[in-house]
Image (cartoon, rainbow, N blue to C red):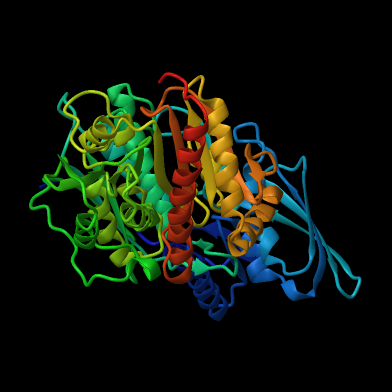
Amino acid sequence: MSTILNLEAPRTLDVLVSELTANPPGTPVEAWVFDDAPSRQAAEEKLAAAGITARIRSSYKPLVYFFLEELHIPSLAKVEIGYPVHPAADPQRFLIEAYPLAALVGDAEVAFHANTLDLTYDIKLTTKAGETKTYTVFAPNVVEDDHVGTPVLRCCGWHKGERLKTDFEIMFLAAVDAVKQQTWERKQPYFDRLRITVDLPANDLDLDFCSESISLREAMHEELFFSLRECLNAEMGAMAGRGGARPGQVVPDIRSTDGNPRIVMSVEEFGEHEEATGEDIDMATATRPLKIGQIRRELAKIEGVPIKAISCEGREVLGRYHNGPGPAVLISSGQHANETSGPVGALRAAQQLAADPDQHFAIVPVENVDGYELHQRLIVENPFHMHHAARYTAFGDDLSFTVPPPMYEREARGKALELSSAKLHLNLHGYPSHEWTRPMSGYLPRGFELWTIPKGFFLIVCTHPGWEAIGEALLDEVAKRLAEDKSLVEFNAKQIDCVRLHMPNAPFEVRYGIPILKQVGSMYQAPLTIITEATDETVYEQVFVDCHEAQTRTVLYAVEAYRRLAAGSDFPSA
């Protein structure tokens, strides 16, 4: 193991309090930093004890924090918000950054409009008593070139009318510099694992809406993971943020601390490929992700031809081919291993299908087993974070886009398609159950902007040219059947209503209460692919049950409809 960065950053709040106490200003103090509410309040109280009036606000999501900390929300009848538009950002950047404010103001009427102010929201409030009040809320940002030379509007600290470089920013920028200054060997992967351990004194804030929270630790994970990959991918000439390059496994491990912020980056070997263990649980009522051992045991209950591949770290990727009459279906999940409801839904559905001798399918329940084990480790410290470090394989690539040999994990999908000749691929996925942000790189997750805000259980149909008609018929039937679950439709509506206010131009259709997308192309091997997207990064208890129940039913409904459609029509040539 070699260490390429070891930095302790003085805590910005402590430095600010110390400097202000040593040189008391003659006027009230305003500052913006990356710290949680209790820490900022404690700093204000220390300053107050020294006779200094101060308001220390959050640089991250300042409008949401303004409503939570400085207003009495139950008294509001109407909320009108003007959001700024900046030439260096997406036109709706600050509208999206205000999410999920529309869901946090109770029964008050909410309206948003663009304004012409510089980095400033304007607010008009009408109380239930008929009183009108106006406010402005500053959103500190600075235009800077990012880690790949693209100008971005970056969230930043602020004090005395100018940018204040905070501990949060200092650590992030130091990590980027360490990777860019490192001399990597000219081969892929550059390393087995690049571990970034960050101690960050910031606690998460749970919000009273679905699974929403505000988390600086999670924002740091997302920024480090994607930004460092983008640095490495740019050096390789690969598409930033996507799957073709194999830089190695990038693992931000963000931990809570009461001490100073610190970041340590080290290059290490994989070592032994250990696996998390635990008791088996009933899949139908599973309230958490299954251990990989149980997944293998559940798979073994399905009769059929074994499918096996070996992962980058040396773990077994297992599947089954269950032969039968009629057209075959491929069921896969765990391609992105932090999407954890898919393996449960895939196995539940496959076990039900296997009980019918007429069914014909192949299943690979966890395609990315190395990522699955990484996710198991990461949720010990931060159980509710989305953990995109576990999205890709240990090579650092998206196995669906792996092109050059060796194939490793992808061999399992290839063998399943070869054995079954399946023309329909049911590809079970998930996405964040709460907002996904990158505050140091333009706020919206680059390349994944549509998925920055959850919008319920989602369906995507991807068809090769010529397969559009059967894809549309299949999608329509599955969506209609899913809509029989009124609780699912109600959950979707709750999230979609909020999305429509904060992201009104999001390009998706809602059919029978199920959000959908349709794509035509040859990206996927099977000519007909149904992709599910459950809000499962990372959820537990009844929310997790609801996610894998929807996954299970999607598979069963799609198989039933597909076999009926196949019996009544000729398929196009693949």
Residue at 18% over, 30% down: 184
Furthest-left residue in view?
Answer: 272
Furthest-right residue in view?
Answer: 130
Quick one: 76 or 294, which is closer to the camera?
294
Count of labels in the image: 0
Tell me: residue 47, above or below residue 263.
Answer: below
Residue at 54% over, 62% down: 212
Tell me if I can see residue 5 in this picture: no
495 with respect to 550 (left or right): right
Residue at 72% over, 69% down: 106
Image-quadrant location for residue 297: bottom left
55 with respect to 230 (left or right): right
Quick one: 283 or 99, which is closer to the camera?
283
Q: Position of residue 483 (x, y in %)?
A: 61, 54
457 with respect to 66 (left or right): left
Q: Position of residue 279 (x, y in %)?
A: 22, 72
Quick one: 82 or 211, which is closer to the camera?
211
Q: Position of residue 123 (x, y in %)?
A: 78, 56
Tell me: residue 53, above or below residue 338.
Answer: below
Q: Quadrant of the C terminus?
A: top left
Q: Position of residue 11 (x, y in %)?
A: 39, 62
Image-quadrant location for residue 364: top left
260 with respect to 103 (left or right): left
Tell me: residue 114, above or below residue 406.
Answer: below
Tell me if I can see residue 378 in this picture: yes
